[in-house]
Amino acid sequence: MVSKVESSKVGGVVDVVIMAAGKGTRMKSKLPKVLHLLAGRALLKHVVDTAAELLARQVTIITGHGAMEVEAALAIPTGSTAKFDINFVRQEPQLGTGHALQQAVPVLRDDGIVVVLSGDVPLIAADTLQQLINACGGTQLALLTIDFADPTGYGRIVRQGEQVQAIVEHKDASDAQRAIKEIYSGIMAVPAKPLKAWLARLDNKNSQGEYYLTDIVKFAVADGVPVVAHKISDALQVAGINSPVQLAELERAFQMRQAVQLMEQGVRLADPARLDVRGQLVCAQDVSIDVNCVFEGTVTLGEGVKIGANCVIANATIAAGAVIHPFSHIEGGKPGTKDAIEVGAGALIGPFARLRPGAKLGPEVHIGNFVEVKNSTLARGAKANHLAYLGDATVGERVNYGAGSITANYDGAFKHRTVIEADVHIGSNCVLIAPLTVGAGGTVGGGSTISKDTAPGALSVARGKQVSIANWKRPAK
Ligand code: UD1
Ligand code: CA
């Protein structure tokens, strides 16, 4: 939900380096830190997608801890606009942020502006980075900074007058320096050529025995290269994740930001604190969403759509006026494929409905409680109101599909299709054994097991004949 970069570019091509070799000990997890999810996307994926928005020429990811897993997870750029090469560079062992950047030197071209990002700082916005790149302009060292009330642990921006002189790490700082509130965010834009020269001059003579990337500021000052601080005030953009608590805090902050954006567009949220959008939610006018709903992938809600409480909806297009009653699970497959879900205008779904990949429901379709629909098309006005299964079915207009009825679509090896033509009435508790066509306007008696095609207009009954024995005496003790 970050805005696209529109500001004009100054000073050259952008090459992004993302540091992601750190261990993330405080996550206390086997999963590498940068693969933990924020709003349904890996932390590192957020950063890579932002690089895509910047139209970066190349993205270099420094990996170390969990390198194999990280590389496997990110190998295919899934961001729709990703048109760059991803390089992975290993840093083993991890001797500091300067050492991390040194590993990238062989793959960095001399003519680029290098934007240094962290894999665990997921919400940095592309427009902020574009401003930072413009501040660099291909000739200056531009640092992204922010004032923190509690700057403990961060590198401090040391100035002489207005001029930035150095970044001093918290552990190396004097008391006077520790009083500085302006900190280095960990993000910079720097011309590649001088960067390489400065990296070659780093040492590890400091309190942590690490090669600090931040020491390049001193070298820039010594070389007469201007150092500029681009200060922002939005702390979320530079928030790093070190622990599950921080991850959850950032998730809530991010969700609240998305909720506010939706409300500003006119969406009515019963409670913005009880909404989770893990992907893209696009809403037309007068949409209302009750509490505890989760949206995943790409979900589009048409005008006046109402979503009841406790619904989980993934990869679905829900047309104008449809109502999704509480506790419904709509689980579409990949957006843009046949597995995405469509719900027609004015349809009524749930409560407790389950729509699975490939459910395509026409206008005014009704799907009631405990009805499962998978890979099936229901035409206008078809109804399955209670306790039923429709799998691999094509259902015509105005069909009424009785309670407890199922399509037996799977023979243990293959899936087969059931076609129920327009105006058919399927009674309760029927089994329709596919492949099967029930002819238009036909009726199937309750409790029937139907395995042969039926003619249009026919009544079909396939069940044991009723036997009644008059005045029958039950056994008695
Ligand atoms: C660093 C900055 C500090 C800044 C802070 C912002 C340095 C020396 N200090 O602090 O000025 O205020 O970020 O959060 O750069 N990483 C590697 N390899 C390494 C070490 C780190 O890839 O050898 C990665 C980490 O995985 C992480 C990022 O670099 O993604 C930053 O490392 P971290 O240890 O969090 O930063 P600090 O040294 O605390
Ligand atoms: Ca550190």
Image (tube, helix red, strand yellow):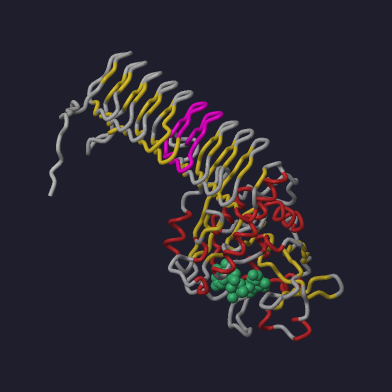
Q: Residue furthest right?
A: 161
Q: Is residue 346 magenta?
A: yes
Q: Residue at x 14, y 38 (%)?
A: 473
Is residue 152 placed above or below 239 in the rendered structure? below
| Closer to the camera in the image, 443 or 240 | 443
* Image location (x, y in percent) of residue 452: 23, 22
- Note whether residue 98 is visible: no
Q: Quadrant of residue 242?
A: bottom right
Q: Nearer the viewer, residue 165 or 177?
A: 177
Query: Left or right: where does residue 310 sit relative to residue 158?
Result: left
For residue 237, which quarter of the picture?
bottom right
Residue drawn at 58 percent across, 50 percent down? 277
Q: Position of residue 457 (x, y in %)?
A: 33, 13
Between 227 and 388, the one lying in front of the other is 388
Magenta highlight on residue 293: no
Instruction: Please tell me in which quadrant of the rendered image residue 233 appears.
Output: bottom right
Estimate the x, y position of residue 304 in percent, counting from the top left.
Answer: 63, 34
**Visible residue check, residue 7:** yes
Which residue sits at x=34%, y=31%?
392
| Residue segment shown in magenta | 341-367
Ligand 1 in which quarter: bottom right
Q: Nearer the viewer, residue 110 or 29?
A: 29
Give percent across and percent down for residue 78: 51, 47
Q: State left or right for residue 71 relative to residue 236.
A: left
Q: Is residue 344 above or below residue 332?
A: above
Q: Residue at x 48, y 39 (%)?
A: 350
Q: Is 199 left or right of 66, judged from the image as shown? A: right
Q: Is residue 16 above or below residue 322?
A: below
For the image, the number of numbered tags is: 0
